[in-house]
Image (cartoon, rainbow, N blue to C red):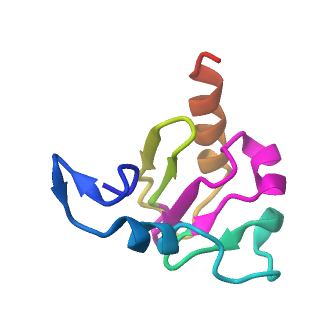
Amino acid sequence: MLLNGGSYNGKKLLAKRTVELMTCNQINDISFRNGDKFGLGFQITSESGQARLGLSKGSFAWGGYFGTTYWVDPVKNLVCLIFTQQSPLKGDVHDKFRALVYQSLEN
């Protein structure tokens, strides 16, 4: 639904502008890890953040306490989810998963 501008199965669930506000920088010059930004509910991949694991600039993501996470990459038309159910999260399984997803794509 978020990848499709607020529509799912032909039904409008959110206005396109609502999705735009949720998935664009709302914190101006403040930076998060790797220079990433935050929208209204999502971490937004920045240009410097994209260099780290290959997510496209503008991808948006969120994670849960027990290691669940997902991201949407509008450029590559991807919605990716990983559910690890671990607290505290150990190792770099999320980074490895992201890297494997992008390595498996054809250019």
* Residue in the picture at 70% in, 83% down: 27
Q: Is residue 50 magenta?
A: yes
* Residue in the picture at 66% in, 44% down: 55
Image height of 1 relative to 55, above or below: below
| Residues in magenta, as a range | 43-67
Q: Quadrant of residue 32?
A: bottom right
What is the x, y in percent for residue 46? 75, 59
What is the x, y in percent for residue 17? 42, 71
Frontmost residue, 41 versus 3: 3
Q: Quadrant of the N terminus?
A: bottom left
Relative to 59, 46 lies left or right: right
What is the x, y in percent for residue 3? 40, 50
Image height of 78 relative to 48, above or below: above
Give the mark count.
0
Q: Is residue 85 magenta?
A: no
Relative to 16, 52 lies left or right: right
Image height of 58 relative to 30, above or below: above
* Residue in the picture at 58% in, 63% down: 89
Q: Quadrant of residue 105?
A: top right
Frontmost residue, 39 versus 96: 39
Image height of 99 relative to 48, above or below: above
* Residue in the picture at 53% in, 70% down: 42
Q: Quadrant of the C terminus?
A: top right
Frontmost residue, 71 versus 13: 13
